[in-house]
Image: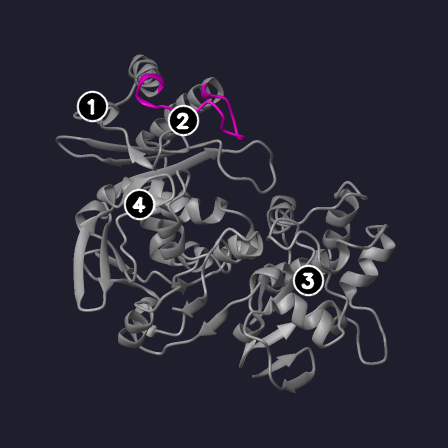
Amino acid sequence: MDFAYVRPNTLAELLELLQRDGHVAYAGGTDILVRLREGRSKVKTLVDIKHISELRGIAVDRQGNIEIGPAATMSELAGHPFIQEHVVALCKAALVMGCREIQNRATIGGNLANASPSAETAVALLVYDASLEISGLGRQYSLPLREFFTGPGKTVLQSGEIIRKIRLSGENVTGCRSTYLREGRIKGMDLATVSIAVWHKGGEVPCYRVAAGAVLPTPARLLQIEEYLAGLQAVNDQHLSCVRGLFGAGVKPRMDSLRGSPLEKKYTGANLLAAALREVTDRTAKG
Amino acid sequence: MAFWINDLYWTGDVAEDRTLLAFLREDLGMTGTKCGCQVGECGACTVILEGVPVQSCLVLAVEADGKRVETVEGLAGETGELHPLQAAFLECFAVQCGFCSPGMLMAAKALLQETPQPTRPEILDALRGHLCRCTGYEAIVRAIERASGR
């Protein structure tokens, strides 16, 4: 491996450095170091984002609005009491990714920017309608996470830009339930064969959101299923049967995935979706 | 850079593109930590960095600057008495070729620091990133249970 390493202390320094040729943001390193080792990367300089305080940390205000820095690790997310209690899908996604050691290094910003079709935190954040703040030298804008992924491994990030903040709004958090379920090929560490996140807000007009990973070119919301479920006070077996069918019809797993045939992914995914819906509508459970 | 490696405080220069694993094994001659897959899939290179287990093949040596690193060499006492985990691994036959053992020991040490009496599922979860070709894992899990006093 042959590259340089720099460690800026401020966001301004970081953004300036990222303008330079071959300079990329370096967070947990669990994706980029593998690519560098396998010779699949043209990176010349790693610019460490982890020493910039405004890019770290998880903040929650009284209304339940959450701000997460891109350098927050999976372990930090899963260990945060508010996230554990109120953003269950994200907590579960963070705990299932990789293994303990990876979770201690892998960051949420890196997971999103790497844009795998099975990015675990992306699937969870999509059902929370998260938004991103993106910064480059001299520019800054906000974007719903829904619009961030453009293809497998591809995002709207231009060269020199980084995710500066991940935001969840209180109205999507308070009084809402969620879960995240996934299957891999083995019990040990593996990328997901298929993953499902479900979010539910009860009340007079119940609302549901569903997202899936590893079954479409990007992590994505399944709007047809959401429309079908909208307004249902309870979800019975007939509804679930219909939802399973909608799932099979609504996803497009690729033929040559290492982790499962399209049929396996559709079948398993449909089962996970049904289980997830049962979980978030279970009146006997706490929350 | 300057950092704590077990009981030693080390200062010196480090190449920027050196992984912590390569630095420990080749620059410091501490070959207790093993080099397996180099891509974060086997756990053989696990060390404890600032109290949490990480795969040293995916950490740059320069990132240890100002931090505390613990490796398997630091487990035994000064006079050579075995750490309870090491003793338990031997008693339970959890070491065959020994290649996964340093990584397993460090992951176990970090687990017991955080969860002194882990359940079996918690042990399995802590070892999820560790491969062993010899033991079939059962003896390792039992060793950790024994070291935790269960």
Whole-angstrom CA distance, mark 4 to mark 2, is 19 Å
Horizontal and vertical percent position of residue A63: 18, 57
Which image quarter holds the N terminus of chain B? bottom right
The kind of residue tagged 4 is Leu
Horizontal and vertical percent position of residue A221: 27, 33
Q: Which residues are magenta?
A: A248-262
The kind of residue tagged 3 is Met
In the image, farthest residue toward the left: A204
Q: Give the residue at mark 4.
A: A125
The residue tagged with tag 1: helix, strand or loop? loop
Horizontal and vertical percent position of residue B53: 59, 62
Using the image as rendered, state which of residue B56 and residue B16 is in the foreground: B16
Q: For marks 4 and 2, give the one nearer the viewer.
A: 4
Horizontal and vertical percent position of residue A138: 18, 69
The residue tagged with tag 3: helix, strand or loop? helix
Check disc 1: other Cα within 10 Å, few if <14, some if 14-19, many if 20+. Answer: some
Q: Earlier in the sequence, mark 4 or mark 2?
A: 4
The structure residue drawn at horizontal position 81% and vertical position 50%, both measured from the top left corner, is B94
Mark 1 and mark 3 residues within 8 Å of each other at the beta carbon: no
Q: Are marks 4 and 1 on the same chain?
A: yes
From this viewpoint, is residue A114 visible? Answer: yes
Using the image as rendered, state which of residue B54 and residue B118 is in the foreground: B54
Q: Can you tell which mark lies on residue A275?
A: 2
Q: Give the residue at mark 3.
A: B106
Q: For marks 3 and 2, give the one nearer the viewer.
A: 3
Whole-angstrom CA distance, mark 4 to mark 1, is 23 Å
